[in-house]
Every structure is written in structure tokens, then in C-alpha cells.
Amino acid sequence: MSTSDWTLGIDFGTSNTAAAHESTGEALVETINLSNGNNTMPSSVYMESLDAVETGESAIAKAEVDPKGFIPAPKRLIAQQSFHFGGVEVPSSVPVAAVLSAVVQKAVREHGGNRPAQLVLTHPEAWSESEIRVLLEAAQSLGLGTEHITTVSEPQAAAHYYSAARKLEPGEKIAVFDFGGGTLDVAVLEAQSDESFKVIAARGSNAIGGKTFDALLRKWVDRQLEDNNPELLEYLRKSATLAERFALEDSVRRAKELLSESASATVNVATDSFDTERLQISRSEFEALIAPVLAQAVNLTRAALSDAGIAESDDLVALYLTGGSSRIPVVQEEMKSVGPVVTLDDPKTVVVQGALVAARRVVRGVAATDYQGSHPGGEQPESLSSSNDASQETNVLPVVNDVQREYKPVAEASPKRRVVLALGILLVLLLVGLGGFVWSKNSGSEGAVQGHADGEQASVEPAGDRLEGDTLKQANHAEEPGDVKASYVAKIPAALKGDLADCKYHESTSGKAVKCALGGVGVKEFSESGGPLELDFFIDKLEAMKKAGSIRDDNVYGINGEPALILDTGDPKTFARIVNSGSAYTLEFSNLNEVFSGSVSGFVDRDAAQRFADSSSLI
């Protein structure tokens, strides 16, 4: 495909990114080779300095040597709008733009250096207007005007892909089960008379995905080593190099993928200090490992169907499976109990190919209208009812009535937003090179967006709204510690106040907080010692955002090497994980709705921490 007038679609995913293209007037949609013969590339970014950024496999290779500056999932930074790097607040659009730039460079090369006439971007159904705006800013910073950018929600893109092969009558309903590397999203859509789709129910989880299966398989490896080679297990937990740990994680992932094709697979544990340990696992053993998580996925799907008023599988024309994790045979088998399963082609690229089909049917660019989250026809999205029991367990998402959303030009943003965006555009200019925009005929280097590495290496931390955070901190500084303590204790959920004892105000590197003992009779049953639990409680927007980002991009292992357990809170603005802190377990939490964060320590086991979390109203 090399015509000058063509359209590029990009599905920017949490774990992987895919792309497809088509020429104007042609019905043929083709995927693009993005890395080593694959039609996807890792969405990872490595920021060595503000003018040296690498993407995909190159970013992962950098992280194996030094993890500082590694952003494994830039998509998870979008909700918080910005993050800290090297002491600077950087817009979340910057690492997103780096990934988009890398994709565009590869695509432009296949078109003789000609830039695309139209760019189609996908996004989760649950995203707010502000989150979609970050995606648009990333695309705009590469030199394409908003009139040439179309956005399509991921389930609608998948629906358009599948409906191209089987035309749906108005009123017929389908469901999309999008099971990716880091998330699970389920949407129920109703076909409209104009060949568009209306999302009538949607649910999702940030705690279920292919990486959840990787973590379960990794724990299986630890158990095998504990029985057969405890010295090697101790080495992995305390002394293994980054390269050795990355190699083990890669072997685990490859074994998981092989089990979709083979009855067994081998995980190789290779280090410089020990002979290679080869651990064989059968498909049936793997299926037993992931059964509890898969049951959650099935229940979430049933809940979404219930929200849509679908009581019988006959009421559903098809249940379409997309996302790389839907390739796993037992996933497909379990979903057959929910509805009429349909799988076509490569599930990793269904969304991006469907986005181009959708854009072909709805040929509209992004209009320069008031940025009020408006929708075609002036209708606002309905709110789904949450009166049923299932809706209390997972997040019920808003209905989106059409493929296209409208946006106000970035120049119309608030003064503070303009400053941050200007910084983002400047950084992207540095990343892709002055005068070397990816939309020009000279598309640049193949693997990464790169410059001179003369800056400071630093870890990447999420940042909140700096103005509001500073205002809150200034207010706290103006108060006496006793006043701060009283205001903090007042913010603690009512469900815990009857168990509070001996609350003390303290300051740490994370900010001001109160530390309280939780000593009620009902609480002590959770405790490792039989005594009180310890609550560390912060009220600071920046600290809450940092904690949320840390949990969302979790790569934490407890003292004994046990991976942290990420809890599915059912709310995109609450986050929690359970970490083995040695002799006991700790619950870490962040609630962006109420703007507080902190931890509760001293639990006897994971189950106790999870039961406490469910009843505490912290999340």
C-alpha cells in the first residue's frame, strides 16, 4: 500500500500498541509491522532525559540495564494528566506522543514518505473527555490538526470490525469482551439504523489481564523452586540482576503464550550463578492456576449483560472476543457459557482494524466546538442505572451514543493547562528533532524517538494538579498540628472511627499525616499479633495521585518476593494493593474521590487484608 492519500489507525494499548492503514477509496485494511515481524509493539517508554526517549523493545532493553525512567504503561498516566520526571512536571501526553511518533514513522515509510491524510485513534469506552483530550494533544504535538483526527471507542471499533463480516439489523445486540494485557473491558452494544452502534452497558477492571496470568505463573515458579531449589529462589529474591529478572519474566510470558498452542510449556530460570532450572507446566495446571481470575472475568461479563437487560444468551447475536488474552483456549471455553462466542483473525488487531472501518462509515474530523463533552446531535450520554447488585461490585460506565466526539481546540484551554501543554509540545519537539516532525517525508529512525542523553536520569513519578496541591499544603502550614490532626481524623471513613485509638500527628517525606491505632474487637481478628492494626492516613491531592499511580503501575514485590495483590475496587478513582511486609501484610490505598491515601499494616494474611478493605470504606 503506497498511495499518497491514506488513513492510519492506531490502537494505543496499556501493554501493546497496534496499527493499521488503508488507502482512500479502497476497502482493504492492513495491519502494519511494528517490531521484529510483529504487528504490535510494546507501549513502553524509557525517558533517559527530557530529550532522549525510546519506545517499545528499545525501552525495555534500556530498563534491563537501569529501570530509572522506565514507563511500562504510559496509558495509565493519562488519567492524572501529568507526572514528575527529573524534578519537572511533564504532561502525560509526552510519552504517549513518543509511542505515536514511533508508529507513524514506521507507517510513513510504507507510503514512500507521504504522511496520512487522516489519523484514527482508539480509546477505552470509560475515558472522560479530559483523558481523550490528552490523546489528542499527543497527536497534535506531532503536527496534525484536529480536523484530521478521529477518535473511536475500543468496543465500538471492535463492533464495526465484526459487523463488516455480518451485517446487523437495527436493535440487535452484541457484546465485546476485550481481554488485553493489563485490563478487561466488556461492553454491550445495540446496532442503529445508520450502521452505528450505541453502547448500552459497559464494565471494566484494571486488575484483570494477561499480566495477571503472568503473575500467577510466576508465583507457581516460586513454589516449584521452594521445593526443589530453595537456594536459587533465595538468589532471585535478593541478589538477581535486573537482566536475570527480566529474562525470567520473559520466559514466564512465553510459556503462557505457548500453552495456548501446546499441551505443555517450559519456564527457564537462567542465572549466571546457578545452572539453568527448567520447570515444565501442563496446560491443565495452568488453567487451574488462572481459574479464580477467569471466574471474575466471567462474572463481570454476566453483570454487563444484566445491566443491558439481557437475561438469555439467545438475546445476544454474538459475544466477540478481542485482545491478546482472549486467545487462551480456556478463556474461550468459559465464555461460551455466557453467550455465542465469535473469534476472527488476530484478536490483538481487531480494534485497530475496526477503527478504520468505523471512520470510513462516519467520515467526520474533530470539530472546533465548545469543549463541553458534547456529542453528535447535542445529546448527552445517559447514566446507566446502578440499582442492581452487580453494579455495586464493578464500575458501571456511561453510555456513548456515537463514534465521534467533539473537542475544543487546545488553544482554548485554561492558562495553566496552556503552560503545561506548551511544555509538552516543546518536549515533543526535542524528542522528534526540530524540523523533523514525523509527518514530514523524512520519517527518522526505526525503533525509537531519540535525542542526546545529556540530562539527569531520574525515576518517573505521577504528579497531581500542582496548583491545588500547593494550595492545600499552604493551608496546612497555616494550621497548628492539633488543628491538622482534628481535620484529618474527621476525614477518616465513619466505618473505622469506632475503632480509632491514640491518633498522632506526624510529618514525613510524603507530607503531613495522622497515625492511628485501629483496636476495636472487630478489627483485631484481622491482626497478625491479635493487637491493633496501624493506620497511616494522608490528605493531600498530590500524595493521593502519587499513590494511585504507584498502585496502577504496580511492580512491587514483598520482602519475601511475593508479588503485590492489586484489588479490583470497581471504581476507576480508587486503588488498593496488599503487600507482604515481612511478618505481616500491609494494605495500601488511594481514594481520589475523597482525596486521601495511606496504608493499614499488621494483617495476618492477604485474605484478612482484603476482607478489611471490603468493609472499611477506604476504597
Image (cartoon, helix red, strand yellow):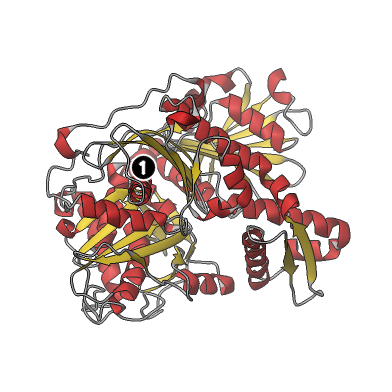
| Quadrant in which the N terminus is drawn | bottom left
Residue on which the image places disc 1: 125
Left or right, 478 with respect to 35, comes to left
In the image, what residue occupies the spot 19% across and 47% down? 407
Viewer-proximal residue among 136 and 81: 136
Left or right, 61 with respect to 96, comes to right
Q: Is residue 436 above or below residue 246?
A: below
Viewer-proximal residue among 21 and 105: 21
In the image, what residue occupies the spot 46% across and 61% down? 16
* Badge 1 density bin: few <14, some 14–19, many ≥20, Cα 10 Å: many
Viewer-proximal residue among 97 and 51: 97
Give how far across and how far down residue 577 sits, in percent: 59, 42
Q: Quadrant of residue 29?
A: bottom left
Q: Is residue 143 above or below residue 309?
A: below
Viewer-proximal residue among 219 and 364: 364
Give how far across and how far down residue 525 sits, in percent: 74, 25
In the image, what residue occupies the spot 46% across and 54% down? 344
Residue 89 can be seen, yes or no: no
Q: Quadrant of residue 524?
A: top right
